[in-house]
Amino acid sequence: MSRSPRKAASPIRGFIYAVLIHIIFGALIGVSLWFQPQVIEPLPGKPVQAKAIDLAAIERAEAEKKRKATEKKKAAEKKKKEEALRKKKAAEKKKKAEVEKKRKATEKKKAAEKKKKEEALRKKKAAEKKKKAEVEKKRKAAEKKAREAAEAQAQLERDEQEAVSAFGALVWAIQQRVSSNWSEPGDFSGMSVSFLVKVDRDGNVISVTITKKSGDSRLDESAENAIFKASPLPFPTEPRYYEYLKEFNFVFKP
């Protein structure tokens, strides 16, 4: 039974509260109309341009910034790679040039050594050729000398044979010339005396030397005198025979 009056009083309380609120608001409005508020004018300021925030534009700007940063990074990397490649190529080119230089130097050295060897070989061959030519020349000269000597010897032998033959043809005449100039009384039958007679180119007797005595001095001396008296003796007129006949053995038989 006690709960029912409270439920009946609630709407009344609410109404009272509402009236009080309106009274308060009314009083406040009256007071505000009573007082004249001082108007405060705002100070002039710089106009501020309002900017609308565009998230899509910001995202695009960030994306563009990132793109440019990426491109810049890529460009820097590309430039770095290109620089590295350029340096690598330059190093390879330098190395290649050095290798080529060394190769050319080696080839030049080899060419110089080859030329030196060829020159040495040429000189060696020239020296050998010269030596061979000198040996051949000496051989030919020796052969010529030997041939000439042989020919000269053969000629000497021929001359000697001819001289002997020519002298042989005059031996009888010499015997007769000496005999006609010999006169010594006595019997000298079976006796003979040998002489080595030396004459000049005209057959004049230069010297007479006994090589074998007869045993009788009278015969030996008379025969020697007869040879001198018979001078000039018959002698070959050919000059080249003289060397073989300037001295000859003469046997005198009375």
Image (cartoon, helix red, strand yellow):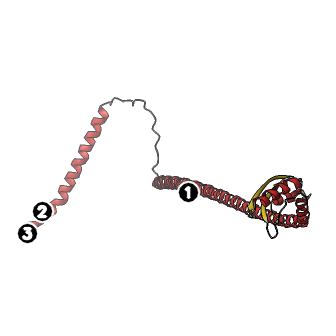
Quarter holding residue 239? bottom right
Image mark for residue 1 = 3
Quarter holding residue 162? bottom right
Kindly report the distance in space between the C-alpha atoms of the residues bearing marks 1 and 2: 118 Å
Lower position in the chain sequence, tag 1 or tag 2: 2
Q: Of the residues shown, which amino acid type is indicated by label 2?
A: Arg
Q: Nearer the viewer, residue 101 or 33?
A: 101
Please name which of the two marks, 1 or 2, marks the residue nearer to the observer.
1
Query: Looking at the image, which residue is at 17% across and 55% down?
Result: 13
Above/below status of 75 relative to 47? below
Instruction: From the image, tell me which residue sits under label 1.
Output: 99
Q: Nearer the viewer, residue 187 or 32?
A: 187
Query: Looking at the image, which residue is at 88% across and 61% down?
Result: 179
Kindly report the distance in space between the C-alpha atoms of the residues bearing marks 2 and 3: 10 Å
Element under disc 1: helix
Residue 203 visible? no
Instruction: From the image, tell me which residue sits under label 2.
Output: 6
Q: Nearer the viewer, residue 163 or 51?
A: 163
Percent x, y for residue 72?
50, 52
